[in-house]
Image (cartoon, rainbow, N blue to C red):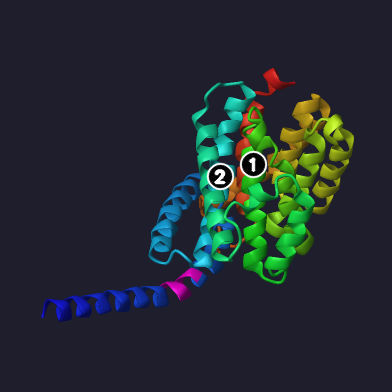
Amino acid sequence: MQKIILTVFLLGLVSCSGLKKAALGPAGSLIYDASNDLLHEDDWQFFEESLISNIKLIETLLSQDPNNEELKVTLIKALSAKAFAIDETYYLEHKLKDTENSIHKKRAKIAYTKALKYSASLFKSRGLSESLLTDYVAKPDELKNMISENFDDDSELDIEFVFFTGQSLASIVNLSRENFKVVAYLPVAKALFDWACEKRPNINGGACDIFNASYMAARPRMLGGNPEKGREMFEKAISERSDNYLVREAMVENYQILVADDVGYRRIKNDFGDLKQKLKDSKVWTGEKLRAPEKNSLNVFNMIALKRMEIIEANEDDIF
């Protein structure tokens, strides 16, 4: 009798597990498809609080269906976004003031590390080595070929997975310049970016242009960098993506501050005047004719840019 009861109980568990996975499959797809809705947000506090709570929710759902790739990629995107948009934005002031042991820098590195661990998990679920990025650290050119062989260049899920893995890796390298073992992964990150950006040049609102211009502007010449070439790339990107102010802010942060270009900085600073008023006017109703909300996928990029420019402006006398 005990054996019969145990068998029935185990069958019930299997059934519940199957039902969970059957339910989470469509839910994962829905959550992944809806993940870009946060790009329309223009309120910093709401963005920060909702992103962090959403990360925990997705982690909880993924724990019930560990092989759900759509949940996994959504989580990689969310962790990368949290680290870049929130932690690195708060860290900017510490960086400008040479503050040691910044808690915001530490939080960014923790979030990027979690994202990369989920990337390793997805590599493993595809039948690849979970340490794949390490396996190719000395041969980044071969990595692009391997990615092409194992990931679908027509799949938005695959392209976003490779892109946000590259972003997480490049960002933690940038935050760990004192650790040469980590810095050695920069060419790997570049290979991931190159593959994803070749497939979708406009991914993430122009992030490919920002990465490539920053990569060129911030690296020493002896390592292939060229600040003037980087400046030209930034100016071209600003011309082509004039509505995305994060490109302007990135030029300030990754070129003008490095070369002490006070004149160029003042010009870009003036560009932010209209954006600041526009975002302010859109948040609080002042009695004008009510209208349905307009969705703008550049809102979150512009909000981040404005937040960072305010930090730079507060410290400009010490920078330039």
Task: Please tell me in which quadrant of the rendered image residue 148 appears.
Answer: bottom right
- Where's residue 256, x and y in %? 78, 30
Distance from disc 2 to disc 1, alpha carbons, whole Å, reads 8 Å
Instruction: Give me the residue at 76% from left, 57% from top.
Output: 144
Q: Nearer the viewer, residue 144 or 297?
A: 144
Where is the N terminus found, in terms of image quarters? bottom left
Which residue is situated farthest in the top direction here?
A: 318
Do tag 2 and tag 1 residues touch (Cβ < 8 Å)?
yes
Q: Earlier in the sequence, mark 2 or mark 1?
A: 2
- Where's residue 244, x and y in %? 72, 50
Residue 290 visible: no
Q: Give the structural element (helix, strand or loop) at label 1.
A: helix
- Where's residue 4, x and y in %? 16, 81
Instruction: Give me the residue at 54% from left, 57% from top.
Output: 38
Residue 164 shown left or right of residue 249 in the figure: left
Residue 71 shown left or right of residue 8 in the figure: right
Q: Is residue 179 above or below residue 292?
A: above
Magenta-drawn segment:
24-28
